[in-house]
Image (cartoon, rainbow, N blue to C red):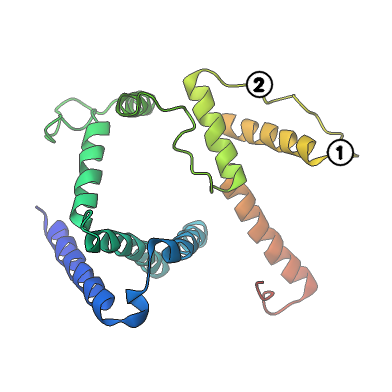
Amino acid sequence: MTDSAQQAGAALERLVDVIRQLRERCPWMGTLTHESLAEYLVEECYELLEVLEGPANADELRSELGDVLLQVVLHARLQEERGSFALAEVIDGLTAKMIRRNAHVFTPDGGLRDVPASSIAEIEASWHSIKRQEQPDSTPFASIPSGLPALASAAKTLKRARRSGTSAQEEGSVVASAESGPASEEELGEVLLAVVGRAVDAGLDPERALRVAVRRYQDEHLARSGSAEPAVSE
């Protein structure tokens, strides 16, 4: 084990102990549940995304990664209190999956392979093949979270459908007039789906693209209006 891994292990052990003490001694922390933590998990993930997509700032990134890690440790602690599983089992399960699904790097027992890494396309094909073996009765869309933002859900859905070889032809199903625009929400949905399809084909992330475009629009709007401070969020 490397020095970095040893330091990380010791730091994680200390964090787990601090969370245990807080759960036992802090009235607010002691009332937390999986349900009450859900909003914080979503919020922290989006805050991390904002840092990742903004100007490089190592201090902010470290802080936001810590906030996301806190959510993982808290959820694992809640299950440990119920006698279900502990954080160590979460880590062990993840480690085993990384070894299992990266057969181009690891042997089944976790040893390193001597052969060079395959191409990216072969690596991705192998990953998805192993995943299908683990979940043989799963549909292409089974693991897409229902709460995923619409653009991200559309992109992931189209990628999964095309990978399975059963993709519907969403492009060209509805073409809105450039002047009049979509006549209904249904038509708008089809137009957006077609746009997402073209983004997927081009290797672009439509969710991130719109998120960054909205931030740029906000900045330009504030600059044009001469506002010294951003608008108060609702």
Mark 1 secondary-structure assignment: loop
**Residue at point 30%, 26% (across, down):** 130
> Which one is nearer the viewer's eye here, 12 or 185?
185
> What label sits on residue 169 in the rendered view?
2
Task: Name which quarter of the figure residue 190 lies in.
Answer: top right
Above or below, 132 relative to 27: above
* Rendering coords of residue 176 (x, y %): 83, 33
Q: What distance separates the C-alpha of mark 1 from that of mark 2?
A: 21 Å
Task: Name which quarter of the figure residue 38 lies in.
Answer: bottom left
In the current view of this chain or complex, which residue is farthest to the left?
A: 1
Q: Of the residues under marks 1 and 2, which one precedes in the sequence?
A: 2
Above or below, 217 relative to 195: below
Which corner quadrant holds the C terminus? bottom right
Above or below, 35 relative to 213: below
Disc 1 and disc 2 in contact, CB within 8 angstroms: no
Task: Name which quarter of the figure residue 35 lies in.
Answer: bottom left
In the current view of this chain or complex, which residue is farthest to the top?
A: 165
Residue to which mark 1 is pinned? 183
Residue type for callout 1: Ala
**Residue at point 65%, 21% (across, down):** 169
* Rendering coords of residue 188 (x, y %): 77, 39
Q: Residues within 10 Å of mark 1 (few under 14, many from 20)?
A: few
**Residue at point 70%, 38% (across, down):** 192
> What label sits on residue 37 in the rendered view?
none
* Rendering coords of residue 105 (x, y %): 21, 32
**Residue at point 69%, 74% (across, down):** 231
Q: Is residue 57 visible?
A: no
Q: Is residue 64 visible?
A: yes
Mark 2 secondary-structure assignment: loop
Residue type for callout 2: Gln
> Which one is nearer the viewer's eye here, 232 or 117?
232
Above or below, 109 relative to 53: above
